[in-house]
Amino acid sequence: MPGVADSATLVPHSDIFVTMQPLNQLGYALLKTLRDHLRPLIAYHLLFTILATALLVPLIAWAARAVLAQLNRVVVTNDALISLLFSPLGLVAMLVGLGFTFLLIYWQQAGMLMVAVKPKDNHYALAFEALWRSTRRLPALSGLVVLQVGAHLLLLTPFMLGLAWLYDVWLSGLDPYYVQRVRPPVFWYFIACALPLLVVWASLAAWLYLRWLLALPLVALESYNPYLALKRSVVLTRGWHRSIGVAVLALLVIIIGLPFIATWLFDLVFTPLLWWLPERSAVLIPAMFAYLTGYILVTLTLTFLGVATNALLSACLYLQLAYREVRPSPRSEQAHPGRWAWAIELSVLMIAALQAWWILNSFEIRDKVTVIAHRGSSMVAPENTLAAVEQALKDRADYVELDVRLSADNHVLLYHDRTLARLTGDPREFGDLTREELSHFDVGSWFGDAYQNEKIAGLDEALALVRGRAGLMIDMKPLPGQERVLARAVLETLDAESDIRYRCWATQESALTAVANCGFPNALMDMRIATMSPDTVSYIKQQAPELRVTLLAQLILPGNLDRRSFDALGLRHNRINRQEIRLAALYGYEIHAWTVNDTTRMSTLIDLGVDAIITDYPDRLRALVEERRTLSDGSLMLVKLRNWLRE
């Protein structure tokens, strides 16, 4: 029987290329194999998914949290993330996590290979046997993962070093946000130099992947040791048709893209049909429930087909190249699913329906979000200037986010970078100059002629400008070791602003006019402070408990973060998920998403449940919020459904 013979029975490679099937015959063999073994493959997929979901994934997650907790560091910024990834512990954790991920994939693929080449009458008996036999091959599969994945990582290393060198040549010293937003000429020089490197690496990685494609079948079915399996795979695949390699790579791309394709098709074809339904709960809710159940089932089906097709492709190629067999033997006519198969497969339908119901219940009809202008309206006026603050007020932002630094004479001024190079061309450090010296720099001309002679402003000037009109989110950018010095200076500036406001209140005739003209009397209760340091959060809350503090982070690592120590957690928008929203509700803090400029993403984040969105376009966000308020309940439910598909 093909697939159980030892290595001595393999056909010599010189004769194999002649008998290799054309591409269209390979596709036909693949489809026939999938049809012949569909039910046992489904059975194995369900059993493996249950095992992985119930035991393996939680175990791996627990191990990852345990390792990362040893870092004693839970908040990661951009710079800290890079240093963490390239630290010894970070590299080890990353390699172990990557290894476990591929081991799960290899384990699942090995079991499906066994199902395909070992036909048996009882589908679920065959699935259980394949699961058991693939589990026994885990040591060998682990060795194969180490060799294959390790080789690909070694291949990647020189190219990563080359990219790092190019980054240092072209982009070092530039603010990443500035590069992303403005995309100066040096950015395109970097892309032009990096692209050939990426093409060369992708070509070599694809060649290596194809040469070793049959190593997994040899380890799983022939009991080869990993090293000999890789050598034998190179021999077997030498000289095969180039179109076969293209087909294999194309299939891999399709498998990765299947979930995205499913979402796109549903959004394109079926979602518009829901807009024609009457906005009555008796009709709309059941229709959305059926829609979501169908979407979940289609996604599960496509995921299964992608995984199964990849395994069967390697099975067909393995049998053709090693045994001159077109495809695995078909199932016998007496094959049957087994007595309890219907119950297991029916549970999939029930799970899909329950998940659809849970999704519908998670939709809240009415919502609100705070509009925070990033560095002012920084796409209309130069960042961190009074002009940008004034524009943000015109755009009806609730808060204006501004970066602050200390001058040499301890004044709190509006500025983001450590040096003056990006905005003024002067290479000197910001903190080495006094407020008087800094006031002579023009930080508006780089943005446009209309903003010539725009000066570096102080926090006190920004507070005066927003008084009674909006609040500030003060993002502190201290030099290393100056976190508390900057925090004290900001608090002193806010205390001085409170004194001004109290005096202003004394001159007003009513509380209503006082709020409009003077703002809330205690400025600390009207403002927010943002920092990337948990220690600074604790210090500020000790000094001014009433001041709302946002902890900013690129991402949060599992560890001992005190989630009750801050008032809001600011995360990059693509790091926000439902788990973070649930944790925020549990511990009573807000979630702030940064920096979001696309209205579609804004809408998705609103429905995800964020409390505030930081954007360069506060006018867009304000218009979106007002547009959503005009929608009926039914229309808003449909918007939420579409946003759920985009998550």
Image (cartoon, rainbow, N blue to C red):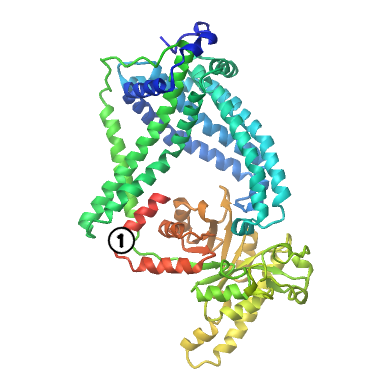
- Going by the numbered disc 1, the residue's amino acid type is Ser
Is 194 placed above or below 382 here? above
Residue at the farthest left position: 282
Q: In terms of depth relative to the viewer, which is nearer, 174 or 467?
A: 174
Residue at image position (51%, 17%) is 218
Image vertical order of residue 126 relative to residue 558, above or below: above
Q: Residue furthest top?
A: 8
The residue that appears at 59% across and 80% down in the rendered structure is 465
Q: Is residue 50 visible?
A: no
- Residue at left offset 27%, top offset 49%: 289
At horizontal 46% and vertical 63% (from top left) the residue drawn is 611
Residue 14: percent from the left, percent from the top?
54, 9
Give how far across and how far down residue 252 sits, in percent: 47, 32
Q: Which residue is mark 1?
A: 635
Q: Secondary structure at mark 1?
A: helix
Q: In the image, is 495 to the left or to the right of 517?
A: right
Asked if residue 14 can be seen in this view, the reply is: yes
| Number of on-image labels | 1
Tell me which corner region of the image, top left, top right, bottom left or bottom right, holds residue 13.
top right
Q: What is the x, y in percent for residue 362?
A: 35, 54
- Quadrant containing the N terminus in the rendered view: top left
Left or right of 640, for residue 585: right
The crowd level at tag 1 (other Cα within 10 Å; few <14, some 14-19, many 20+) is some
The spot of residue 462 in percent (x, y) is: 62, 77
